[in-house]
Image: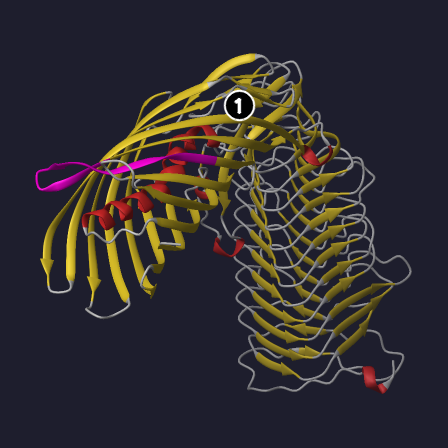
Amino acid sequence: MTNLKKLKLFVASTLLSSTAVYADCPDDEATNCGINITGNQTIDIDSSIDVEDVKGIDINSSSNTLTIDGNITVNSSVDRAFGLNFNSLNATNNVINMTGDITTISTGGATGMHGIRIGPASSSNTVNVTGNVSTTGGNSSGILIIEGGDNNNVTLFGNINTSGGSNSNGVRITGQTNNFGINNTITVNGDVSSVYSHAIAITGYAHDSYIVVNGNVQSTNSAAIHISQTDTVNNIVTVNGNVSTSATSGNPTIAFNSGASDNLVVIDGNVTQFANVPAIKFGANGTDTSHDNTVSVSGNITSAGTGIRFNNSDNNEIFVSGNIEAGSSAIYADSNSDNNTVYLDRNSRIEGAIRNDGTGNTLLFTGWTPIEPDEIDGDVDFDEVVTGESQYGLATSANYTVSGTTPWVVQANVEQPVLTGNTYIKSMGVANIDDEGNRLYLRTTKINQNLTERTRAYAHNEVEPYWMSVYTTKSKRDEDFKEIHQNARGITIGGQLSQFNKPIDLVFNLENSDASYGLSEQHIESNSVMAGALIPQIANLFDGDLSAKVLVGMSDNDTRRTVLNNLADGGSEKVTGDYDSTYVVVGAEWLKTVLTKGNTNNDMVLGLDFSQEYLDSYSESKYYHLDSRDISQVTARAEYGMTYHEKDSPFTANTRFGIAHRKMVSGEKQDYQIDGISTSFKGDEENTYFNMGVGLDYQLTNGIKAYVAGNFMDSSDEIHSVSGSFGVMGSF
């Protein structure tokens, strides 16, 4: 060794007990240069440790505090030359704070070159390393906690890289019968990668331990995360990045083998397998059943082979928020696997075969939110890993092809029909059916507002012969599984017929609208026209004016929906359709001035409308056919209006407050067929709407007035709407 590689030690405090042995390097040929800690001491080491054929630091006593400012490098041609080692039962309650890297380098085939090793019965130690750990050689792990090491806490702020042979894991916790290894915590804030073995391994009776990786986890030739052996239970692994492997030896990316049970793995990223083997596998052939394990994947699961494989495994559950893309089977449960559950987010895509040969295996289509990895601790209740309802989402459509000797148990939205059989799982999004009554109400809302203002103008003798209104409306509902996003743009024009005894306004309206449901799983675009007449003063009733209206119209509607299909490229396909609908609306309105004081007029409006809509039958691709539907709906409404006009001012301001309730009296049920199989869905029957509006008129000339108005609407069904309009009225 050169002088630069000689060990330099500084004793920062008085030794509390027996003397430690510091083996400084006397010359360049010296090899036995490690540090053996045998006393209870506080030590500062302000230089790097560079040794050959021995352990870098070997701790054989308790209650030591070491601060290391430098690297630990071990070059060895002999086995078991560790970087940092806690050696025995006596190595407890030690605290190590290190700024630097730990590197072990095997020369001449040396094995057991672990970076950090916490040995048998070494408990309650704390290790903090600001740097990286890298190892070479067979059986050389980055961080290793073995038999009976309990309550240890290791935090690494850098990366782990192991490039040795068999059993050269990035992180490994293991135990023995009656010598478990309990409540250990390992946190890696960087990446963990292994070339020949598992990146993360929990085996051999390890209990209640917690491994956190805040970067990515990757293995080249073995499982990235491997949990195995009977009585390896109640361990938690969380990864805040991606997990991947390109193993060609049959090792999955995430594996639960040989009886591992009640373990939790949470991945806040993607799980990728580049070889023709499973991305996630529960169980193994000819071994004890792997059971009651839970996996949560917030990203995608991708494999050149199988996505999720249940192999001699029972009662496991896996939550998938993203897509499953597999070269062969996306999901496969063999004949020895029972009562496993795959939770699929309602918007997840599945690409690949779906096969079940076991009993009681369930596909649960749901909306769910995985718990964040940083919210998990050693006391996790497995029943609280996810939150979410067993719902499909009203807009979700599916056409899955399945196989196997046993049908899947399918759970989805209890309101939405899902057809299942030995070879299929089918459903049609029904959000448009559920929303049809609301769409009918919204179609006439802006027209009704215009006609009410005309009735007010007649009551106050402020009528201009002609008028025009341009409007835009945006509505939405954010409720989970029932999302609605609607937009409408339209123009309404009207004119007075004065040749009759009673004044009559003719009305004409054009509107373009679009409605999206869910996360754009369903979409409808409509172009419609309505025309009719308003008779503003049929009679005087209870000191108020009674008016009536009639409107007729039609719409051309184009539909588009996303259908989840595991045999289609990308796991989904688009289907389209079109249909016509016709409208008839008749209604009456009573308006009474209730208070006039100074420059302010107050009035009350009561209205009742009867709406009829007929929807033609139509088909969407080969999958869906909807029968014709005839809807009758009654809407009752009340409004209080305040109008303020200061004498000689060109401005008039107004505010409006109202409530409306619609009730579908017939046509609630839509009959339809999925691949020729008949079913039906009953839509939303009623809703209550609360409206508030403000407006401002401006007298441009003696005979022409312009206005702007805004309106906000909220409903009992959590539909919210905002609209704006502007227009002119006058004699042209």
Residue 175 visible to an observer of this rendering: yes
Side (left or right) of 306 relative to 688: right
Side (left or right) of 644 relative to 167: left
The answer to which quarter of the image holds residue 400 is: top right
Side (left or right) of 73 relative to 540: right
| Observer-nearest of 672 and 143 | 672
Q: Which residues are magenta?
A: 529-547
| Observer-nearest of 607 and 317 | 607
Question: Magenta region's main secondary structure?
Answer: strand
Side (left or right) of 467 relative to 49: left
The answer to which quarter of the image holds residue 72 is: bottom right
Horizontal and vertical percent position of residue 266:
57, 47
Q: Residue at x 16, y 46 (%)?
A: 604
Asked if the stretch drawn in magenta spans residue 545, the answer is: yes
Horizontal and vertical percent position of residue 486:
47, 43
Question: What's under tag 1, amino acid-wise?
Answer: Val
Residue 386 visible to an observer of this rendering: no
> On the rendered image, what quadrant is the N terminus found in?
bottom right
* Count of marks placed on residues: 1
Q: Residue at x 31, y 61 (%)?
A: 697
> On the rendered image, what quadrant is the C terminus found in?
bottom left
Horizontal and vertical percent position of residue 708:
37, 59
- Which residue occupies the extreme right position in the image? 108
| Observer-nearest of 404 and 451 | 451
Asked if the stretch drawn in magenta spans residue 590, the answer is: no
Q: Which residue is mark 1?
A: 410
- Which residue occupies the extreme front position in the image? 499
Horizontal and vertical percent position of residue 683:
40, 26
Q: Residues within 10 Å of mark 1 (few under 14, many from 20)?
A: some
